[in-house]
Image: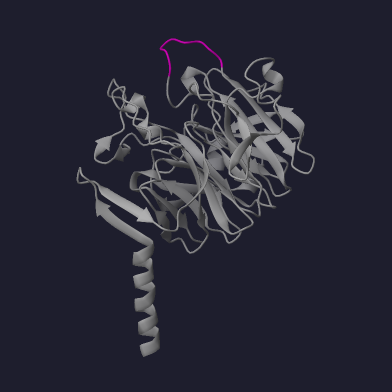
Amino acid sequence: MAIRKNYSKVMLILMALVTTASLDSRGQQRYHSDKLIPVADLGKRRAIGVSVSSDNRLFVSFPRQGTDYLYGLTEIVNGQPLPFPDEGWNAHDGDTATRFVNVQDLYVDTEDNLWVLDSKPAPKGSIFGGPKGSSAAGAFKLLKINLASNRVERVYTFDDLDKSTSGLNDVRVDTDKGLAYLSDPGRAAIVVLNLTSGTTRTVLKDQPFTTADPDVILTYDGKEMRDGNGNPFRSNVNGIALTKDNRYFYFKPINKLNLYRIETRYLADASLTDDELASHVEDMGKTTVTHGLIADKKGNIYLTSSMDYSIKYLSPDGKLHTLVQDSRLLWPDSFGIGSDGYLYFSCAQLQRDPQWNNGENRVEYPYQIYKVKLP
């Protein structure tokens, strides 16, 4: 018994050494964790999508923003982002059918294909809004890249999708059912793409679990995230995750604390009405304000938690844990899980943009890709 008590004391001391908290000059809480490991210095180029292959190849995508934009999709080699799959797809000009426009999300499926969501929503479908009365249409495509050959095998163009209001954000691919599931915050819905026919179905539109809660306002260091007109940042269903056995699909709006899931067999059943489909959605309970989600082989669901600068995970027993907390985690966004036992992720720092800070750019350069050891 004495040995067990001493062991517990040692573990508590070690945990304290790993994560420390202090107050900065403005009296705000600051956190530091030795568990957080920088992987790639991206300078002034904001990364969004992150995914990792079975042999631990790390892929990172960049939206087309700012004068420092260079590549839409890269592979990180020796800490450096190299254009992937080639320079042609990363060209800044030319036919948009054969080059990236605005790469949003990445996903490596269970067969080691890299799926690349190239998504430029119309103003009506963007979480950032746009000019009032704008009739511009969005542009979307999904690429399947075989990582054995590094070749693009197919491109899906969502021809049957309402491009005036859609805002495709994240993608997960169910290799068992031949389906892709995409979050669409623009329409507060899930899009199910048939990978054989290329046709889509829109499901769970405007349901309570796909719609932002107006009472959940993102707040950082005591300041609400609002634009110059006083409008708060708001996003409907955004982060999504697919379990490794392709059984469960997890999802939630950013502006909502509850996490939801549904068995993919119901998403695959085109005969179900939206009300019937909604009856199969499970409420997993309150979590946190979340941007990205991912599932590991053990059934843990990882959630980025930006308001307290942390990564959390929901274990199969329904308990919510903090994996790492560090003040460098400024809007942790997208995840990838490596075969080396690490969780990789980007930090987008959206709350530091001029739009939310009275025109002042408060981004802390450089943008980074980080990793942290899985539990």
| Image side of residue 235 versus residue 64, left or right | left
In this view, the residue in front, 193 or 234, is 234
Judge from the rendering whether residue 210 lies leftward or rightward of residue 175; answer left or right.
left
Magenta stretch, overall SS: loop
Where 317 falls versus 68 (above or below)? below
Viewer-proximal residue, 259 or 141? Answer: 141
Q: Position of residue 10 (x, y in %)?
A: 37, 76
In front here: 43 or 223?
43
Asked if residue 259 shows in the view, the reply is: yes
The correct choice, above or below, for 203 with respect to 336 in the image is above
Q: Position of residue 192 (x, y in %)?
A: 63, 35
Q: Quadrant of residue 244?
A: bottom right
* Up-down relation of residue 237 to residue 298 (above or below): above
Residue 264 x, y percent position in the rendering: 63, 47
Is 134 part of what is drawn in magenta?
yes
- Residue farthest toward the bottom in the current orientation of the protein: 1
Q: How is the image coloured?
A: one colour
Q: Is residue 236 left or right of residue 182?
A: left
Judge whether 2 appears above or below 195 on screen.
Answer: below
Magenta residues (range): 130-137
